[in-house]
Image (tube, rainbow, N blue to C red):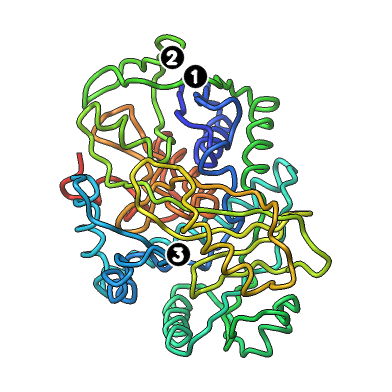
């Protein structure tokens, strides 16, 4: 089968790998000059398989209305005259109910644990290098209420097969000695030794090269997809900046922009862009070895070879990718709290939009259009979930039984979708 994959980020390239490995003729279409140049380019680096709590949860519901009034809040969600955003917000708030949040957590953990298995398979099969570290993730807390809530959630996840360690302040400092210099109060933490980290941009670019050299995948870079030709029942071709392209099947892996294309054939994806920020600095003498998450400011830190990346925050600002100083200052502030002796002058700054579903899990597989498939909606977890969802997608296209339950990932979970 000839398959066109639209988008060369982490989701597009993992899909290309799984599908080409099964003998399909695969071509990837990407408007950038190479793979992983947008959302994947400078992400936080964490392969946070144990982080399965969706943004939509009861704790966030209690805070979100107060956060709307603050420019420095971890999540900035302001209603505006945007019907798509209003619809998304209403669905998001409904998903904050305890039962729904627990169901979505189970779905996110199910795909995360599967993705860890599949990520290990890809690494073993390709031998690509990407500053891969298997030293776990340490989640640190500054107040007892937040820590108690996280402990309760960790016990819930333990029932689902995810084990995490609850650490005292001293155990946190022993686990990651670089935190001994922190000005920020650290009262305790949660550590997952099964979590990992790595450079998503480097991984995606090298996997793309592997796909081209070993699996015969063709890449059309610098090509913009303008329109889907056909109907809600079937795509006949796509119009691009380089002319029409045809295939037997098409995969939407364009992140937040998948929504705009799907809408052309009256398929409505419940995805809204969520902007995130990051900074990258050269590693210093006692830079952290373990990846860290600052719970208070929702900022993560990862060692990527000779660099350290700090990333986080969530801002709903449509398709605007401009760097807002007030928002990126939150990243710098968290960095200075934990590593006050490290100068931040000259840090590389980055902002991107991430395709966020209101309930949390990604969108994978079938649409009402017979030959159009989804591999998008991963939000902040594209790097974490991308390997697993790519294998699910390949099984769906090949009409095979999936290795894990598919329930909770397809577009059909939204009753009014499409």
> Circle 1 is placed at which residue position?
223
First in sequence: mark 3 or mark 1?
Answer: 3
> Circle 3 is placed at which residue position?
109
Label pair 1/2, CB-CB below 8 angstroms: yes
Write the residue at 33% across / 27% down: 371
Task: Determine the residue located farthest toward the left in the rendered image.
Answer: 416
Provide the secondary structure element on which disc 1 rests: loop
> Circle 2 is placed at which residue position?
241
Nearest to the observer: residue 198 or residue 409:
198
Residue 388 position, x and y percent, is 51, 50
Write the residue at 68% across / 90% down: 170
Nearest to the observer: residue 341 or residue 379:
341
First in sequence: mark 1 or mark 2?
Answer: 1
Nearest to the observer: residue 23 or residue 408:
408
Q: Specify the label residue 8 is tagged with.
A: none
Relative to 275, does residue 253 appear above or below in the rendering? Answer: above
Provide the secondary structure element on which disc 3 rests: helix
Provide the secondary structure element on which disc 2 rests: loop
Write the residue at 74% across / 75% down: 178
Q: CA distance from mark 3 to mark 2?
A: 39 Å
Q: Looking at the image, is mark 3 or mark 1 nearer the viewer?
A: 1
How many labels were placed on the picture? 3
């Amino acid at each position: 089968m000839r398959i066109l994959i639209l988008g060369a980020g982490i989701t597009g390239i993992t899909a290309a790998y799984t599908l080409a490995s099964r003998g399909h003729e695969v071509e990837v279409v990407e408007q950038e000059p190479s793979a992983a140049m947008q959302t994947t380019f400078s992400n936080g680096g964490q392969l946070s398989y144990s982080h399965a709590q969706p943004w939509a949860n009861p704790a966030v519901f209690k805070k979100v209305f107060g956060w709307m009034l603050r420019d420095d809040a971890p999540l900035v969600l302001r209603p505006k005259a945007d019907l798509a955003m209003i619809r998304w917000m209403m669905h998001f708030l409904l998903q904050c109910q305890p039962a729904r949040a627990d169901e979505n957590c189970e779905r996110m953990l199910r795909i995360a644990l599967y993705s860890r298995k599949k990520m290990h398979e890809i690494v073993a099969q390709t031998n690509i290098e990407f500053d891969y570290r298997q030293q776990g993730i340490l989640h640190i807390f500054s107040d007892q209420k937040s820590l108690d809530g996280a402990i309760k959630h960790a016990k819930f996840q333990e029932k689902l097969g995810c084990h995490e360690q609850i650490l005292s302040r001293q155990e946190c400092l022993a686990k990651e000695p670089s935190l001994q210099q922190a000005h920020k109060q650290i009262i305790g933490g949660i550590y997952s030794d099964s979590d990992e980290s790595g450079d998503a941009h480097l991984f995606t670019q090298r996997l793309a090269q592997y796909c081209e050299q070993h699996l015969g995948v063709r890449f059309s870079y610098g090509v913009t997809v303008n329109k889907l030709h056909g109907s809600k029942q079937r795509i006949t071709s796509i119009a691009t900046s380089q002319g029409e392209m045809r295939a037997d099947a098409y995969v939407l892996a364009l992140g937040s922009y998948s929504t705009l294309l799907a809408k052309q054939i009256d398929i409505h994806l419940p995805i809204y862009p969520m902007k995130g920020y990051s900074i990258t600095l050269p590693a210093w003498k006692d830079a952290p070895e373990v990846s860290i998450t600052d719970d208070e400011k929702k900022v993560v830190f990862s060692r990527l070879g000779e660099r350290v990346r700090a990333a986080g925050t969530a801002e709903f600002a449509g398709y605007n990718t401009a760097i807002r100083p007030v928002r990126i200052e939150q990243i710098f502030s968290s960095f200075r709290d934990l590593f006050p002796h490290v100068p931040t002058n000259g840090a590389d700054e980055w902002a991107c939009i991430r395709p966020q579903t209101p309930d949390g899990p990604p969108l994978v597989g079938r649409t009402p259009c017979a030959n159009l498939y989804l591999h998008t909606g991963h939000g902040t977890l594209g790097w974490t979930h991308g390997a697993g969802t790519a294998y699910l997608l390949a099984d769906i296209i090949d009409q095979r039984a999936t290795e894990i339950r598919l329930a909770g990932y397809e577009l059909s979970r939204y009753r009014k979708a499409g």
